[in-house]
Image (spheres, rainbow, N blue to C red):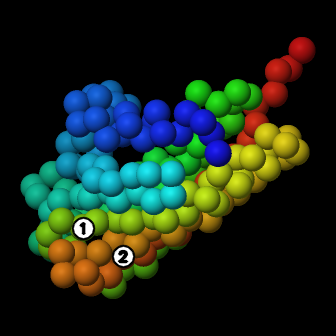
Amino acid sequence: MNPRANDFIKLMKHPVKFRMFLFTKLPAAFFAGVRVREADEKRCVVTVPYKWLSQNPFRSTYFACLSMAAEMSTGALAMAQLYKLNPPVSMLVVKVESEYFKKATGRTSFVCEDGELFQQAVEETIATGEARTVKARSTGRNKDGEVVAEFMITWSFKAKTNKS
């Protein structure tokens, strides 16, 4: 595991620093109200509310806002593994799959528990120099615990090399 992963998780949990990160790097997520609620090396919980900036015309949360929260729940785990890593490793979303089961009419919480998959992929790409992919699951539930949507987000990892 990246020894600095916990440093990144502390940054994510800091309300002001993380909101500034969202505001400068992911303004759509900032204004939609996407927030990291829980995080450790293995699991991340991200919420998105149903509000004016995240709504669709059908009185539910717009699918793109649900997708942002799902992606963040997976991406935060990946970024923790890459934080200040040497050699550096790049990451990129290469595929997003989703299924919707119920209207999202309140706060939706997305949970990803695939932190160990990210750790393994990063270790392998550093060891081999070959790209690795992780297909991470993020499940969105409403306040009653009912599944609203499920996302499978495929991330690609590649160790950066010095080109001389």
**Residue farthest along the top direction in this orientation:** 164
Q: Nearer the viewer, residue 130 or 32?
A: 130
Task: Tell me whether the residue at label 1 lies in contact with that at label 2, contact meaning CB atoms closer than 8 angstroms.
Answer: yes
Q: Is residue 78 above or below residue 135?
A: above
Q: Nearer the viewer, residue 108 or 81?
A: 81
Displayed quadrant of residue 153: bottom right
Q: Is residue 162 visible?
A: yes
Q: Is residue 96 visible?
A: no
**Residue 6: image location, x then y, percent:** 48, 39
Q: Earlier in the sequence, mark 1 or mark 2?
A: 1
**Callout 1 secondary element:** strand
The residue to which callout 1 is attached is 108
**Residue 42: image location, x then y, percent:** 51, 58
**Residue 124: image location, x then y, percent:** 79, 50
**Image check: 15 left or right of 78?**
left
Displayed quadrant of residue 155: bottom right
Q: Is residue 3 above or below residue 101?
A: above
Residue at left 23%, top 36%? 15
Q: Quadrant of the C terminus?
A: top right
